[in-house]
Image (cartoon, grey):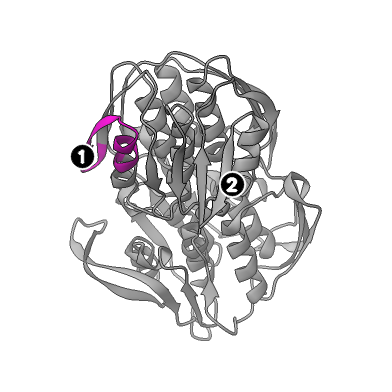
Amino acid sequence: MTDLVVHPQAAPLVGSVPVPSDKSIAHRALLLSAIAHGTSRLRRFAGGEDHASTAQALRALGVRIEETGSGRERELQVHGVGLFGLTEPKAPLDCGNSGTTMRLLAGLLAPQPFAATLVGDASLMRRPMMRIVEPLVLRGAPIAGAAAEGRRYVGRDGRAVADCTAPLRLAGLAEGAFLGPLEYALPVASAQVKSALLLSGLYAHGATHLSEPTLSRDHTERLLLSLGVPLRTVGPVVELDPAGWSGQLPAFDAEVPGDISAAAFLLVAAQGVPGSNVVVRRVGINRTRTGLLDMARDMGAAIRVDPVGDEIGEPIGDMFATSAELRGTRVGGELVARAIDEIPIFCVLAARAHGETTISDAGELRVKESDRIAAMVEVLRAFGVACDERPDGMQVQGRVGPLDAAEVHSRGDHRVAMAAAVLALSAAGPSRIHDVDCIATSFPRFVGTMRALGARIDVERT
C-alpha cells in the first residue's frame, strides 16, 4: 500500500502542465473505434487504469489495439472489426474499478449473439447495476445481475425493486433475434446509462428514445453525430433511429482532450495558495462538464478559459488559474449534475471559503467508488473544517486560516485521495493520506504534476 505525505505549501504553485486524457471521452472513443470499419488513431491517449480495463476487454472481444509513444504523447491504433465483428470472450471480462467500462460494455454486448460475463474489483462488484439492467431487459436483452440484498432500486415507474450488482451475465441473443425499440425516461440523469442504451440502439430494430430529468454529459451523442449516426437531441432528450442508416461507423483520427476532472484538482490547488499561477493545457470544455467552473466562479475563484479548437465534436481550451479569496455559496440541481465527479474537489473550495457552503442534490455520490459524501465529510473534519452530513450532500463552514495537519484514508477512491492531498497544502504541518494507489485509476502522474508546480509531496510504501 502507498501513502502520500503532503507538506504545507510555503511558495506559490507555478507552471504550465498537461493532464491525462478525458476519461469519459476516451472510453467512448475506444468502444466506437472498436466497432468502426478500418483503423482509427487516438492521439494523446494518456489514460489511467480505467482506460486500460476498457482496452483489455476489447482485446478479449477480438479487437487489435496497438500502442506507441508514452505519457501524454501516447497513441492508440484501433483496428475496428465493424458493428458485427466482435467475438465471444474466452473468460469473464474484467472491468477493474471502472463503472464506465462495465456499463457501456453491457450496452455494447447486449445485442451480440454470444454470451459474456462482466466482473470487476471489489469496489465495482458492490456498485448498483439495476439502472442498466432494467432498460436493457425492456428492449429484449438477455442480461441479469447478482441480487444485492437489502438494497432497493426505484425504476422509471416509481416502484422500488431489489437492486443488483455484478457479475453481469449476458446470455447472447438467439439466432435471428434482435433488440427492439425503446422509449425510456431515466429516473436519474446518467451518462453511463444513456450511453449504454445508445450503443445497444445501434443494433436495434426500431428507435431508441431517451429522456433525463436534467442533461448529463453528452460525449456519446457528440461522437456518434460526428461519425454520421442518425441522432437527434433536444436538451435532455435524445433519439437514435437506425432506419435507413448504413450500419457502418467510419474509422476516425482524433486527439483526445485533457480531462477537466483531473484539471480541477490543479485549478483548485491554485486558488488556495497565495501568489499561484497555474496553466492547464488543452482540456475538454464541453458545457455538460464545466459545472465546477461555474460553481468556483460564483465563489470568486480566479479561473479563465481560452478556447483553442475542437476535436470529434468536443471543444478544447487552455485553463488559467490564480489564487483568490473565496466566499461560500449554495449549489444543487443541474449545476451539481454537471459537476458530479468534481464534488470532492469542490469540497476543498468550500473548506477554504469565507462563510458557509451548502451542497444538495448530490445523492448519486453515495454509490460511486466510495460513499463520497461520507468520505469527504470525514476528510474535512480531520483537517479541522466544520461540516454537517446530509442525505444528498453536506453543509461546510469554511476555515480561512491554516488547517489542522491530518491523517486520512482514501477509502480506495481516487478523487477522495487527490482532494485530500490538495486540502493538505493548506495545513499547518505535514499530512498523511493512506492508500493512494487508487489515484492511478484516473491521474497516474498526479504527484509528479503537483511536484512540477512546486508542491512538496513524499511517496511512502507501507
Q: Is residue 38 visible?
A: yes
Q: Earlier in the sequence, mark 1 or mark 2?
A: 1
The quarter holding residue 394 reads top left
**Foreground residue, 304 or 430?**
430
From the viewer's perspective, is residue 10 above or below residue 77?
A: above
**Foreground residue, 338 or 264?**
264
Specify the segment rendered in magenta: 377-393
**Foreground residue, 291 or 350?**
350
Residue at horizontal 66 percent and vertical 46 percent from the top: 226
Q: Position of residue 221 (x, y in %)?
A: 55, 47
The quarter holding residue 431 reads top left
Q: Position of residue 288 (x, y in %)?
A: 48, 36
User: Is residue 436 part of the magenta span, yes or no?
Assistant: no
Mark 2 residue element? loop
Residue at horizontal 56 percent and vertical 31 percent from the top: 266
From the viewer's perspective, is residue 175 above or below residue 62?
A: below
- From the image, tell me which residue sits under label 2: 443
Residue at horizontal 33 percent and vertical 65 percent from the top: 130
The quarter holding residue 347 reads top left
Density class for disc 1 (Cα within 10 Å; few <14, some 14-19, many ≥20) is some
Residue at horizontal 64 percent and vertical 44 percent from the top: 20
Q: Amino acid at mark 2?
A: Phe
Extreme residue toward the right, this view: 68
Mark 1 residue element? strand
- From the image, tell me which residue sits under label 1: 390
Circle number at residue 43: none
Q: Is residue 234 visible?
A: no
Whether tag 1 and tag 2 are in contact, CB under 8 A, the answer is: no
Q: Position of residue 398 (x, y in %)?
A: 31, 22
